[in-house]
Image (cartoon, rainbow, N blue to C red):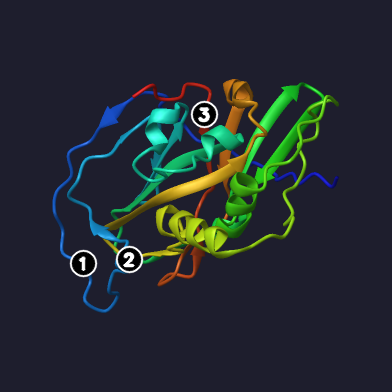
C-alpha cells in the first residue's frame, strides 16, 4: 500500500484537555451566508483536543465508547464494526471565509519509530459498507491497515444507513466568518482503538478565501481522548 506523508514545517501547540471557552456572539457577514450546518460562534466548545491560530479554532473529540454513538446511530454502531468517529468542530473567528480540504485530512498512526501510516477518512458510503458488510478478521500483522473498498450489496438498508452517516458527518468545506461547523469524521481502525494512544489528526489544507492565502496546518495530538 502506498503511504502518504506530509512535510510538517512547524508543530502546532495542542492542549490535550477538556476546555470550555465562552464566546461572544458576532453577526454573520451578509455577503457570505452560512450553510444549515453552520452556527454563529456563540456556543462553548467542549472537547478532548483543541488548537487555534489565524482566527480558526479546531477541536477534535474521539468517541471511544459504544454509548457515545447511540444518539447518532441508534441501530448499528460504527464502533462495534471497528470504526472510530471523531467529532470535529471548526470555529472561524476571522473576518474571512475559510475553506477546509476535508479530503486531505489524515489520521496519523505511529506503530513504532520506523512504521507510520496515515489513514484517510471514510466517506458515508464506505462507512455504510464497513458497518453493514464487515470484513472477516485476519490474524495477520495489523500494519498496514487496509484501505476500505466497496464489497457491494447496497440495498435499501444500505441507503438508509448511508443517509444517517452523511447527516452526522462533516461535509461543510467552507466556514463563513464568525460561524462554526461541526460533524463526524470516520476512520476504519479495524477495532484496534488502542492505536489512538499514539495518534495525531493532521489537517494540512486550509485557505483564507478573501485573501487567497494558505493557513498553517493543524496537527492535533489525540493520545489523550475524552472519556465523557
Residue for point 77% across, 41% down: 146
State which mark lies toward you, 3 or 1.
Answer: 3
Depicted 47 relative to depicted 126: above or below:
above
Residue nearest the observer in this picture, 50 or 140: 140
Q: Residues within 10 Å of mark 2 (few under 14, many from 20)?
A: many
Which residue is tagged 1?
Answer: 28
Depicted 36 relative to depicted 115: above or below:
below
Query: Is label 3 in a helix, a strand or a loop?
Result: loop
Q: Earlier in the sequence, mark 3 or mark 1?
A: 1
184 with respect to 186 (left or right): left
Q: Earlier in the sequence, mark 2 or mark 3?
A: 2
Q: Residues within 10 Å of mark 3 (few under 14, many from 20)?
A: many
Q: Earlier in the sequence, mark 1 or mark 2?
A: 1
Q: CA distance from mark 3 to mark 1?
A: 31 Å
Instruction: Please state the horizontal and vertical placement of residue 226, each as a whole percent of the image.
Output: 40, 25
47 with respect to 140 (left or right): left
Q: Residues within 10 Å of mark 1 (few under 14, many from 20)?
A: some
Instruction: Please state the horizontal and vertical placement of residue 113, each as a whole percent of the image.
Output: 77, 21
Instruction: Please state the horizontal and vertical placement of residue 121, each as a whole percent of the image.
Output: 60, 49
6 with respect to 169 (left or right): right
Determine contact: label 1, label 2, CB under 8 Å.
yes
Residue for point 53% across, 34% down: 79
211 with respect to 108 (left or right): left
Residue nearest the observer in this picture, 228 or 160: 160
Which residue is tagged 3?
Answer: 222
Q: CA distance from mark 2 to mark 3?
A: 27 Å
Which residue is tagged 2?
Answer: 176
Label disc, if present, on residue 69 of the rendered structure:
none
Amino acid at each position: 500500500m502506498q503511504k502518504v506523508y506530509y512535510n510538517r514545517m512547524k508543530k502546532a501547540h495542542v492542549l490535550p484537555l477538556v476546555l470550555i471557552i465562552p464566546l461572544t456572539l458576532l453577526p454573520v457577514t451578509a455577503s457570505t451566508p452560512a450553510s444549515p450546518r453552520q452556527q454563529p460562534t456563540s456556543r462553548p466548545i467542549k472537547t478532548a483536543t483543541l488548537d487555534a491560530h489565524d482566527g480558526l479554532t479546531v477541536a477534535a473529540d474521539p468517541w471511544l465508547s459504544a454509548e457515545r454513538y447511540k444518539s447518532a446511530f441508534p441501530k448499528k454502531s460504527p464502533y462495534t464494526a471497528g470504526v472510530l468517529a471523531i467529532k470535529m468542530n471548526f470555529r472561524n473567528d476571522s473576518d474571512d471565509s475559510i475553506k477546509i480540504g476535508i479530503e486531505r485530512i489524515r489520521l496519523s498512526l505511529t506503530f513504532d519509530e520506523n512504521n507510520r501510516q496515515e489513514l484517510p477518512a471514510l466517506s458515508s458510503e464506505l462507512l455504510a459498507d464497513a458497518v453493514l458488510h464487515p470484513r472477516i478478521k485476519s490474524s495477520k500483522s495489523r500494519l498496514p491497515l487496509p484501505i476500505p473498498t466497496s464489497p457491494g450489496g447496497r440495498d435499501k438498508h444500505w441507503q438508509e444507513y448511508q443517509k444517517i452517516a452523511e447527516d452526522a458527518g462533516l461535509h461543510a468545506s467552507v466556514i463563513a466568518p464568525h460561524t462554526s461547523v461541526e460533524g463526524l469524521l470516520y476512520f476504519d481502525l479495524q477495532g484496534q482503538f488502542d492505536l489512538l494512544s499514539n495518534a495525531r489528526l493532521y489537517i494540512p489544507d486550509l485557505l483564507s478565501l478573501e485573501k487567497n492565502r494558505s493557513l498553517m496546518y493543524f496537527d492535533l495530538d489525540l493520545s489523550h481522548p475524552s472519556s465523557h
